């Protein structure tokens, strides 16, 4: 009953608090840590002995490493080899060297300082990648580099777990000799793939999702326990299992089967870490903990910033990368526990460093906010980039907005030998497109003087492909007012945008997702055994009806009540139109047969 009460308290607290932390931009990891602190022995004391829970929850880290192994297809790793093994290795060893030197200065022995330096050089994959994804920065330069560095760090956890016992003073048993573990690893690498393939093919024949999930968990836990028996870590066994199955046809199904257990147990692991965090140390040594936390962040941030700048990175990218990776990582909790077990570190030292890592993760969101403020300040202080000088000769076509839509129009025109003048207000986009050999000018088409400079008066067609709705409407209004003879072909983001363009008298406009959506609908109908000719007719009828409804609703767009009523009526009309199309098609088919 006590264990059920504890589980209920954990689940309730995490459901209440973790979403709040995520919504506040602080990340789910910090939310789980806070839950652990609140209900642990240093908080409400609902859990008084977190050690047992921590050992169970370490399965979350084991499953995380299995998923990481599944993602490491050899082809993908080879494509990222320069960033991963170049920048990743430079960051890890450069930061580890600086932190090891600091540890030695603070009185640690060289073995302990080396281990501490490498562990603290690791950053939080579980915090950084989801945070960058939420900020839509994974595709940016610093986002891609952060991913590569974190991937190398995750890979380095495996050998580090195997090497920690060599730095310690604990007595090795017969099974913990390194040669035994390495020999076992070699055997698993040779026979593991065909054995696992045979196992999962056998399970797949049963066609039972539960059995497949059971087989996946048995594989992970079996190899984890086998590696542990060989003197290596359970995490290493799980990672090896993932790598062996990375190219398997069952990879995606395995990931889907493991994901719920991995997420739940990883959350439980962070809660257990929060419970185990010795807050008494923060009360006894507040200054020391604060100084160590600040020192960790400063050393990691400065070293990574300097290394990235030495490799030729831009100041802004290097700064964002350094701030994103300045915290400690979740694997530090496992590694410090291992270091304490093998007597590399004392109990108080390990507890202090674990608390420092947790504190560094707690301030990580603030570091990213600070980075955003620095970026805004730097951009504000920079003189605005002058618009490009426009070509002397005018073109038949002017394209405003050279993103996804504008580029497709431009490529088709180029293929037909038709010249055009392309404008885009995003300087980064202009520089990127130019590297691919396409001619585009930096400038904001919503400025009348720029439209004159682009000699739009000599053009026959103005292609309005600007992504931002308000900027698109301002540009359309300017062109209609000052260059009424120029035909406008416009891209609309949605129905509202299309309606506003129609208000300006622009009839040649199309919602960007409409053609692809109609094509997908046609394919869907065909896959549901509708005759292709009937599916084509239905889609065409839908498109005509939708255009008629949009024209009717243009006049009442300001009245939400009337708009809702009109939409309900249009839905009934559409059903009748499509049914008429079906009846007409059926009669035609019968007539042809007779």
Image (cartoon, helix red, strand yellow):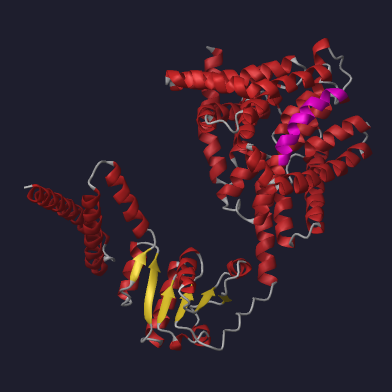
Residue 568 against residue 203 in the figure, above or below: below
Instruction: Find residue 427 and report its horizontal and vertical position in percent.
Output: 60, 70
Q: How many marks?
A: 0
Residue at left 55%, top 72%? 425
Residue at 38 percent of width and 58 percent of height: 513
Residue furthest left as drawn: 594
Residue 413 vertical placement versus 533 (above, below): below
Residue 96, by quadrant, is top right
Q: Is residue 157 found inside the magenta-colored segment of the image?
A: yes
Image: magenta residue range: 152-166
Given residues 44 and 373, the one toward you in this image is 373
Q: Is residue 33 left or right of residue 112?
A: left
Q: Name the quadrant containing residue 319.
A: bottom right
Residue 503 falls left or right of residue 62: left
Q: Nearer the viewer, residue 114 or 463?
A: 463
Evaluate whether residue 190 shows in this view: yes
Q: Position of residue 173 (x, y in %)?
A: 83, 11
Residue 134 falls within the magenta-colored stretch: no
Image position of 110 (left or right of 434): right
In the rendered view, would you say 135 is above or below 46? below
Rendered location of residue 402, percent (x, y): 51, 69
Query: Visible in this render: residue 26?
Result: no
Give the x, y percent position of residue 53: 64, 19
Magenta: main secondary structure: helix
Please name whichever residue, 173 or 447, is drawn nearer the observer in this view of the structure: 173
Q: Residue at x 77, y 17 (%)?
A: 231
């Amino acid at each position: 009953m006590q264990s059920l009460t504890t589980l209920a308290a954990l689940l309730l607290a995490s459901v209440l608090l973790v979403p709040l932390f995520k919504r506040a931009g602080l990340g789910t990891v910090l939310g789980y840590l806070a839950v652990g602190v609140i209900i642990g022995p240093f908080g409400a004391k609902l859990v008084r002995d977190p050690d047992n829970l921590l050992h169970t929850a370490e399965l979350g880290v084991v499953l995380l490493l299995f998923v990481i192994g599944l993602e490491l297809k050899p082809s993908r790793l080879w494509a990222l080899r320069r960033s991963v093994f170049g920048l990743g290795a430079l960051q890890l060893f450069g930061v580890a060297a600086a932190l090891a030197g600091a540890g030695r200065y603070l009185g640690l022995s060289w073995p302990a300082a080396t281990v501490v330096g490498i562990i603290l050089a690791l950053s939080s994959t579980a915090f950084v990648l989801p945070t960058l994804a939420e900020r839509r920065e994974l595709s940016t330069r610093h986002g891609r580099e952060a991913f590569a560095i974190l991937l190398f760090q995750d890979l380095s956890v495996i050998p580090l777990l195997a090497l920690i016992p060599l730095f310690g003073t604990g007595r090795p048993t017969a099974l913990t000799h390194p040669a035994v573990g390495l020999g076992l690893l070699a055997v698993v690498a040779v026979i593991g793939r065909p054995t696992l393939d045979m196992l999962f093919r056998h399970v797949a024949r049963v066609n039972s999702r539960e059995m497949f999930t059971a087989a996946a968990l048995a594989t992970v836990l079996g190899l984890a326990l086998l590696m542990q028996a060989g003197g290596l870590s359970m995490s290493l066994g799980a990672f090896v299992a993932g790598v062996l199955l990375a190219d398997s046809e069952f990879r995606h199904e395995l990931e889907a089967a493991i994901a719920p257990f991995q997420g739940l147990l990883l959350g439980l692991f962070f809660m257990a870490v929060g419970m185990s965090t010795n807050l008494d140390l923060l009360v006894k040594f507040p200054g020391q903990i604060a100084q160590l936390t600040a020192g960790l962040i400063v050393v990691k941030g400065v070293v990574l910033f300097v290394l990235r700048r030495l490799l030729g990175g831009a100041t802004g990218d290097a700064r964002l990368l350094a701030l994103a990776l300045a915290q400690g990582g979740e694997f530090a909790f496992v590694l410090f526990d291992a270091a304490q077990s093998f007597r590399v570190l004392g109990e108080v030292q390990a507890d202090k460093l674990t608390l420092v890592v947790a504190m560094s993760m707690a301030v990580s969101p603030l570091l990213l906010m600070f980075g955003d403020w620095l970026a805004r300040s730097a951009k504000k202080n920079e003189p605005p980039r002058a618009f490009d000088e426009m070509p002397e000769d005018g073109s038949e076509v002017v394209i405003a907005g050279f993103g996804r839509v504008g580029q497709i129009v431009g490529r088709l025109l180029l293929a037909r030998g038709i010249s055009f003048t392309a404008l885009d207000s995003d300087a980064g986009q202009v520089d990127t497109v130019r590297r691919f050999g396409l001619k585009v000018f930096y400038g904001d088409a919503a400025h009348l003087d720029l439209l004159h400079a682009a000699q739009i008066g000599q053009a026959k067609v103005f292609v309005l492909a600007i992504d931002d709705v308000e900027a698109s409407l301002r540009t359309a209004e300017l062109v209609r007012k000052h260059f009424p003879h120029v035909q406008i072909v416009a891209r609309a983001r949605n129905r509202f945008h299309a309606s506003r363009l129609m208000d300006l008298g622009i009839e040649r406009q199309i919602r960007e997702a409409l053609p692809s959506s109609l094509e997908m609908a046609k394919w869907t109908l065909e896959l549901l055994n509708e005759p292709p000719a009937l599916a084509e007719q239905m889609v065409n009828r839908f498109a005509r009806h939708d255009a008629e409804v949009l024209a009717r609703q243009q006049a009442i767009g300001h009245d939400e009540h009337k708009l809702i009523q009109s939409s309900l009526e249009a839905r009934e009309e559409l059903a009748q139109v499509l049914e008429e199309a079906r009846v007409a098609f059926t009669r035609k088919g019968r007539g042809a047969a007779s």
